[in-house]
Amino acid sequence: MTAHRTLVLLAHPDLEGSRVNARLADAVRDLEGVTVHDLAAAYPDGRIDVAREQQLLLEHDTVVWQFPWHWYSVPGILKSWMDQVLTWGFAYGTDGTKLRGKTLQVVTSTGGPEEAYADGGYNRFTMEQLMRPLDATAHLCGMPMAEPMVLHGVRTMSDAELDRQALQYRALLTIDRARAA
Ligand SMILES: Cc1cc2nc3c(=O)[nH]c(=O)nc-3n(C[C@H](O)[C@H](O)[C@H](O)COP(=O)(O)O)c2cc1C
């Protein structure tokens, strides 16, 4: 049996200005079997190499979408990736079975605190509700969606708490490998 492989699609439009996602990515970069793929660095002009991205997906068992929460959704660079890479005949539709059985793990950070993401709260909806398009996308592609890892209120998160979350992320990807082995 081949070793379990995890592809982290790091989708941040300005990683140099990132505190949270840069720290999280650094926490998993050296893990065995984990490929951290920085989409903005790979495609500075925004032109995605679809064949390369699809090949990367084929070579991995778990796919992580790691990104800062932007306007209640994924950043444009990840939406672009989804629009271009998750094609009919590859990800869904007739013979579009290439992603079937691969786990999708969402890892995201929000400026808003946890209590703001509630019915009647500042942001009106729960994260579970707002993530439904991602859930539906995973479902269409036949990808079981793992429980998302969400870091809330990151603007006021202490460095110590961020370190703790980074360790938790590392553990999550390690456990994912161990479970699959
Ligand atoms: C364009 C933009 C849109 C954002 N939209 C939201 C949002 O809808 N909800 C929210 O809680 N935070 C929002 N934020 C805050 C980011 O989620 C937060 O700055 C990010 O998670 C921090 O991660 P980083 O240090 O890796 O950049 C937004 C930030 C930017 C720049």
Image: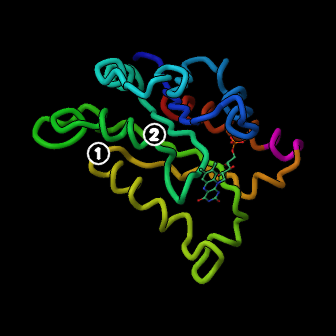
Give the percent coordinates (x, y) of residue 130.
Answer: 49, 64
Looking at the rendered structure, which numbered label has been put on residue 142?
1
Question: What residue is shown at x 45% (from left), y 33% (from top)?
Answer: 62
Give the percent coordinates (x, y) of residue 88.
Answer: 18, 38
| Location of residue 30 with respect to 102 vertically, above or below | above
Which element type, helix, strand or loop, lies under badge 2? Answer: helix
List the single residue furthest toward the bottom: 120
List the single residue furthest toward the left: 94
Where is residue 32, by image quadrant? top right
Which element type, helix, strand or loop, lies under badge 1? Answer: loop
Tag 2 and tag 1, C-beta contact below 8 Å: no
Q: Is mark 1 within 8 Å of ligand 1?
A: no
Say what amino acid the circle numbered 2 marks.
Leu
Question: What residue is shown at x 58% (from left), y 51% (from top)?
Answer: 69
Foreground: 133 or 178? 133
Q: Mark 1 or mark 2, which is nearer the start of the sequence?
A: 2
Q: Which residue is mark 2?
A: 78
- The magenta span reads 159-164
Q: Is mark 2 within 8 Å of ligand 1?
A: no
Q: Is residue 30 left or right of residue 38?
A: right
Label 2: few (<14), some (14–19) or many (≥20) C-alpha neighbours in 10 Å: many
* Residue 99 on the magenta span: no
Question: What residue is shown at x 58% (from left), y 45% (from top)?
Answer: 107
| Location of residue 80 with respect to 177 vertically, above or below | below
Say what amino acid the circle numbered 1 marks.
Gly
Which of label 2 and label 1 is nearer to you? 2
